Every structure is written in C-alpha cells, then in structure tokens.
Amino acid sequence: MKIDIVTLFPEMFDSPLSHSIMKRAIENDLLEVNMVNFRRFGSGKHQHVDDTPYGGGAGMLLKPEPIFQSIEEIQQRSPITNKRIILMDPAGKPFDQSMAEEFSKEEHLIFICGHYEGYDERIRSLVTDEVSLGDYVLTGGELASMVMMDAAVRLIPGVLGNEESAETDSHSSGLLEHPHYTRPAEYKGMTVPEVLMNGNHKLIEEWRHMESLKRTFERRPDMLEKRELTDQEKDWIKQ
Ligand code: ADE
C-alpha cells in the first residue's frame, strides 16, 4: 500500500513510522509512506496557507490552492493507482473498524491533515471521504490520521505475524474480546479460570464466546444492537 500524508508537520510522523509493526511493514515493502508538506504551495513570501473567512468571523481557514496543488502533485507522481482521498475532519463520519478494513484493501490512501478553524469548502470537492477520529476536537488532523493509518495497515495481509493475528481482535467479530490469562496460574490470590486449563477445546471456545458476549453486554451494549443474538447467547446474557 502507498500512503501520502498532506500536512504542515511531517516530522510528527517520524516516530510512529520508525517503530514496531509500521517500521517492519515499510522494511518489508508492504507499505510506502510519503510526506507532502503543503507549505511549499503557500502564497507570498511567507508561504501563507490560511486566510480569514469571507463574511467575517473568528479563526483562519485553510486556503484551497495548497491542498489542490498537493493532490495534483501526488496524482502526477502516481497517476494510475486507485485512490481514497481522506479529509481529517471532526465533523466527518466517525472512524471505526469496518472503515479500517475498507481502507486496508486500497492501493493508495491520501490523508489530508488540516489545522486552524477549518477548510475552505471547495477542498471537500477533492476528497472521497471526510472522516473523524471521534467526537472531540484535536489540534490538527495529524494524530487522527496516524491512528487511522495504523488501524488500516495492521490489516494488510502479511503485516502482522502469526502471533499478532488480527482475526480475534475486539471489534472484528462485532463483540469485544474475551479475557486472556498467561502464567502464573495464581498471582496475588487471583486464579486462572479452571476451564482454560483442562484442555477441552470445545468448552474453552464456548467459555470464550460467552465471556466476549458478557463483556460486550456490560461495556458496549450499543454493539449488540447491530447483531442478531442466538437463543443460547440470550441465555448467557441473562446469567
Ligand atoms: N481534526 C481535529 N479534530 C479531529 C478529529 N476528531 N478527527 C479528525 N480530524 C480532526
């Protein structure tokens, strides 16, 4: 996958891209990340990228030209790839696991990271998606795009090793993950559930499914509204 980040602060991405799984994905040629600093396309001696809103009001808006020119430069460099052009915006569609799955299947993602009060509206005509990390306002789109990129890249086949498999992730099945235990069998008086130690895989699977469901019911009942429950699952919840 190819990712372009359109940002005023490319250095913010240095650390996340040079550690752990993202670093390995780049080294293994599963991921290529380019930075486009749109300050280069700012106007005047001071390369301004923002201006005051027509009609008055507080705050500055990102001007259209630097963003349009950044996207044109990327298009010229990679004309044939299938692209998603994603605008970071607290007023966008909330990001979730299914969006991460969609993004992970694309050949080329372009994240546009804004700052200041907002975007000149014409910038929206360039993009395929307007996405928010959540219902809060960050100082800019950089951190939001890092989170989205991380969630999508780990789903690209070959990026995670076997031990790090994404198949049992919380959210991938529509349920939260069940509890996990490793050695020791007892720690500070807290013990591992007997069922996990008796080697009966059918019982272990059933226990895990039930615990996933109970945890989801307690912590995220909203997730169950999107899911049809079996009769047995309904019984488990009642327990
Ligand atoms: N920029 C500022 N806040 C944001 C958010 N919540 N999501 C995406 N981009 C943002």
Image (cartoon, rainbow, N blue to C red):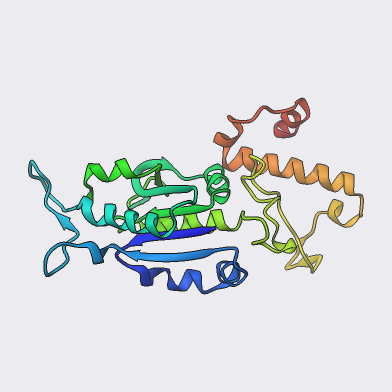
Q: Quadrant of the N terminus?
A: bottom right
Q: Position of residue 63 (x, y in %)?
A: 19, 52
Up the image or down, 164 lies above or below 211; here it is below
Question: Splitting the image into 4 quarters, where does residue 39 fall?
Answer: bottom left
Specify whether residue 146 is in view. Answer: no
Residue under the image location 82 percent in, 45 percent down:
205
Q: Is residue 60 above or below residue 239?
A: below
Q: Residue at x 86, y 51 (%)?
A: 195
Q: Position of residue 191 (x, y in %)?
A: 78, 60
Quadrant in the picture for residue 54? top left
Count every numbered label the image shows and give the total: 0
Q: Which percent across, then down, holds residue 43?
A: 15, 62
Who is closer to the viewer here, 219 or 50?
Answer: 50
**Residue drawn at (42%, 56%), measured in percent from left and top?**
145
Query: Can you say whether 81 is above or below 10 in the image?
Result: above
Along the horizontal axis of the image, is 206 left or right of 27?
right
Please state if 2 lies on the left or on the right of 172 as rendered: left
Q: Quadrant of the C terminus?
A: top right
Left or right of 159? Residue 126 is: left
Left or right: 51 in relation to 4: left
Residue 155 in sight here:
yes
Residue 135 versus residue 130: which sits nearer the camera? 130
* Front position in the image: 64 or 132: 64
Q: Position of residue 55 (x, y in %)?
A: 8, 41
> Looking at this rendering, what residue extends furthest in the left direction?
56
Question: Where is residue 12, by image quadrant?
Answer: bottom left
